[in-house]
Image (tube, rainbow, N blue to C red):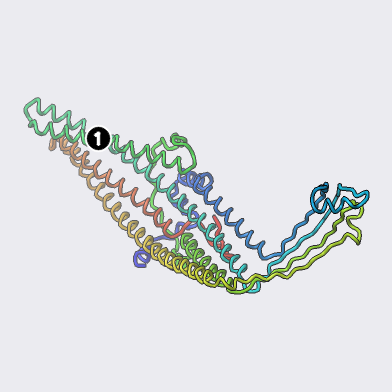
Amino acid sequence: MEQAAVGQQHAAATVNLSKWWEGFNDPLLTHFVSLALEQNLDLAQAAARVTQARAALGASNASLLPSGTISSSAARAYQSTETPLGRLLNATPNYDRWGTAYAADLDASWEIDIFGGLRRAREAALADYQASEAGAEATRLEVAAQTADIYISVRGLQSRLVIARRQVRVEQELLAKVRLLYGRGLAAEYQVRQTEGELARVRATVPVLKIKLDAAMNALDVMLGSPPGTHRAELAKVAPIPATPKFASLGSPADLLQRRPDLIVAERHLAAANARIGEAISEYYPTFSLSGLLGSATAVSTGNLFTSGANQAAGVLGLRWRLFDFGRINAQIKLAKGRDAEALAAYRQAVLRATEDVENSFSALINNEEETVTLAQGETSLARARDSSSTAYQNGAASLIDVLHADETVLEASDARAQAQTGSARAAVAVFKALGGGWQVRKSGSVATN
């Protein structure tokens, strides 16, 4: 990965991927990301999906083990005189038509998994569970990245809004000066109109920035699982745009495959689809089961229920074989193989997209940082030019209009630099997300949060 290699040369070992948001050295950003990881509702949904998958895995595990039930009953019934049996019993002297029956039984059964169908079903359920865990981590990574991205956007918009308001004041001062010169016949009318138009243009940017800022603050509240406006007071004070952090060692492409939870999801889905092929093939073969009954029954009284004469027992060896259903089994196997091929293509596509994501994010980061450096240099040069024009004005070698025009140019450069700086910090967030930062893999293969 060419861009990744460039990124490694560019990086300094200062930020660990496990908690990359701390690398921005912004306590409020860290606070909001931590809050989002606790309260975000997308994460709550992901956790519920993990619970469902864990339950399905438990059911698959249970299918491999014997099952047993304990049952008991007590019944009392009256024999009709009009049924065939009742008429036959009419000839029996002193026959009591009221009857009582008691029973207590222990039933046990076990499907013997000789050909591995149940084991393959359990393997598929385990892969689905692991995919749900990785999916929850992918959601966690997405939530952390979106929260940081929105926060950086808020700070960038606040900086631009401060610059825009300064631009409005400069344009107002410039318009006042041009009108004064026009009144004295020292400026043309088109200069007045041109300055008025420029002031209107700059003023129009303020409400646009306010709209974007309000939307970003509301979006941040939603990410934190809160109603819009909840954390507005914490964000009201303008703070600098977070500085773009550097990176620790990024590792090899193989490390990327282990770090990105979305790739783990795709790989586990592939494993589950493969296991279901084996489950479908096992239907070609017979299944055997053992079942047994041990209990006691009496039709007299509970006192005789557990005597030797009331004992009852049974043992059954079961066989089920879909001998004349191979056409349907063939179709089920083809269906499973088709899903496996789809999962394989999805996994390969996920790997390619992950590589593309890393390449694009590093390209954006490198070029945004280069743009930021260039614009900062230009801003510095224009600020010096503005100071020179101010000195010239004080010495009578330049007009106030020249000074105000220089201020206007500096502020335009400041706005461009603020946008580039915001873009650079957001690109860093995209890099951390592309690298799968924020989680790690346990030795067992399941994911662990940091």
Please name whichever residue, 379 or 271, is drawn nearer the observer in this view of the structure: 271
Please name whichever residue, 322 or 425, is drawn nearer the observer in this view of the structure: 322
Disc 1 is placed on an element classified as helix
Residue 89 appears left or right of 51: right
Query: Measured along the vertical axis of the image, is residue 229 above or below residue 364?
Result: above
Disc 1 marks which residue?
204
Residue 159 appears left or right of 292: left
Q: Give the quarter of the image for residue 185.
A: top left
Q: Quadrant of the C terminus?
A: bottom right
- Residue 80: % across, % down: 81, 47
Residue flagged by tag 1: what amino acid is it? Ala
Q: Residue furthest top?
A: 183
Q: Quadrant of the N terminus?
A: bottom left
Total numbered badges shown on the rendered structure: 1
Residue shown at 52%/69% (left/top)? 328
Please name whichever residue, 215 or 171, is drawn nearer the observer in this view of the structure: 215
Residue 79 appears left or right of 12: right
Residue 55 appears left or right of 131: right
Residue shown at 24%/42% (left/top)? 412
Q: Give the quarter of the image for residue 395.
A: top left
- Residue 220: % across, % down: 43, 42
- Residue 199: % across, % down: 20, 33
- Residue 123: % across, % down: 58, 66
Residue shown at 59%/68% (left/top)? 120
Query: Measured along the vertical axis of the image, is residue 304 above or below residue 221?
Result: below
Q: Residue furthest right?
A: 94
Badge 1: how crowded within 10 Å, few (<14), some, or many (20+)? few
Residue shown at 50%/68% (left/top)? 336
